[in-house]
């Protein structure tokens, strides 16, 4: 038996929502898991890139193809949770989501692997259990939750390990321009530059802005959103890892119609959120800044993907 699952890319944080907000985007990975009948074939893991991004090929080479593969680990954990061991498995990953760009490629493969394996096992795990398992393996509920549910999601891992999550409404009329530079940044490195402690004033700043953001999206308040989309907990520290980031943020600061510009997840991709604003102008501004620093960039204006991971027939 063989099951394929299509999972969307995700963008975590959205400015002040560090480690708790994320949204799904219409770029997909498809994960297929097949329980092979031939004994002794072990695990076979195949990775296929569907994008034109040749730069990803080298990164693909560094992805483990054995029991250390993150998808296999997730699948094994699910089997173990019901007292079973995985049999011989063939895992195919068709990837459109650029890797190490802050677009949730690892959350997508973990979620896809878990949902496919769950189906193979007769669906013993419900949505909450899958979310917990995926977070345990991947570490970021702000990517995992929108990958499973689609849409714009608030997700928090509580101190007891449980995940609290709710879907929020993202205003359909707000455009999201995703700007993906041709350099990579691993989440580990992007987290290593964060301080262990922050000044109380910065924590208060983010709490205020996150509250504003939730109200702004719920009431479609563009003016409030423009104030809300500021953060002091992660972006200022990550700026040094993303050449051009500061200039891009500066460039849109005083533009009416651009609600804000944020790092996508741990970066280096960036999102420009706008309302009734010239999208070509966004593209050319970002392109000029990044290309001026010899960085190639792939820019796409996308809608939030409302559908989360889906099992393909
Ligand atoms: N919230 C996480 C971070 C997302 O910014 O480090 C990682 O994908």
Image: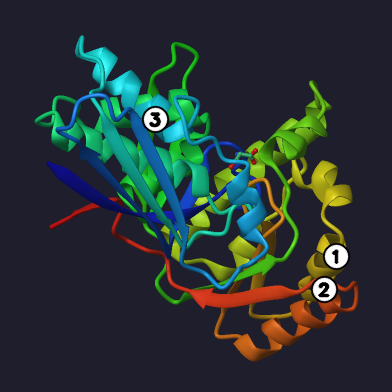
- The reply to whether callout 2 and callout 1 are in contact (CB within 8 Å) is yes
Mark 2 and mark 1 lie on one chain; the one further toward the N terminus is: 1
Residue 163 is situated, as x and y percent measured from the top left of the image, at: 39, 26
* Mark 3 residue crowding within 10 angstroms, few (<14) / some (14–19) / many (20+): many
Between the C-alphas of marks 2 and 1, the distance is 6 Å
Q: CA distance from mark 2 to mark 3?
A: 37 Å
Say whether residue 148 is left or right of residue 17: left
Residue 153, above or below 134: below
Residue tagged 1: 244
Q: Secondary structure at mark 3?
A: helix
Q: Across the whole image, how many numbered discs are drawn on residues?
A: 3
Q: How is the image coloured?
A: rainbow
Of pointers 2 and 3, the one earlier in the residue sequence: 3
Mark whose residue sits in front, 1 or 3: 3
Secondary structure at badge 1 equals: loop
**Residue with the mark numbered 2:** 290
Q: Which residue is under mark 3?
A: 72
């Amino acid at each position: 038996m063989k099951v394929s699952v299509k999972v969307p890319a995700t963008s975590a944080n959205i400015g002040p929502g560090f480690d708790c907000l994320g949204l799904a985007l219409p770029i997909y990975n498809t994960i297929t898991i097949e329980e092979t009948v031939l004994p002794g074939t072990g695990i076979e893991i195949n990775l296929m890139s569907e994008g034109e991004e040749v730069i990803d090929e080298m990164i693909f080479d560094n992805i483990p193809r054995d029991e250390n593969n993150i998808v296999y680990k997730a699948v094994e954990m699910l089997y173990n949770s019901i007292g079973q061991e995985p049999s011989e498995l063939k895992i195919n990953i068709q990837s459109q989501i650029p890797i190490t760009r802050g677009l949730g490629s690892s959350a997508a493969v973990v979620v896809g692997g878990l949902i496919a394996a769950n189906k193979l096992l007769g669906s013993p795990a419900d949505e909450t259990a899958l979310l917990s398992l995926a977070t345990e393996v991947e570490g970021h509920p702000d990517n995992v939750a929108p990958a499973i549910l689609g849409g714009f999601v608030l997700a928090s891992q509580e101190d007891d390990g449980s995940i609290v999550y709710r879907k929020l409404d993202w205003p359909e009329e707000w455009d999201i321009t995703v700007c993906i530079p041709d350099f990579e940044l691993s989440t580990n490195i992007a987290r290593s530059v964060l301080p262990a402690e922050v000044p109380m004033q910065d924590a208060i700043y983010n709490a205020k802005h996150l509250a504003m953001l939730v109200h702004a999206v719920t009431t479609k308040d563009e003016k409030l959103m423009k104030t809300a989309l500021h953060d002091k907990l992660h972006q200022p520290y990550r700026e040094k890892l993303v050449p051009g980031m500061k200039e891009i943020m500066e460039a849109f600061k005083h533009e009416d119609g651009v609600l804000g510009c944020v790092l996508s997840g741990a970066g280096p991709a960036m999102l420009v959120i706008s309302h009734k604003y010239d999208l070509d102008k966004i593209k050319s501004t970002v392109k000029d800044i990044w290309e001026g620093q010899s960085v190639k960039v792939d820019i796409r204006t996308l809608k939030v993907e409302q559908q989360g991971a889906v099992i393909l027939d």
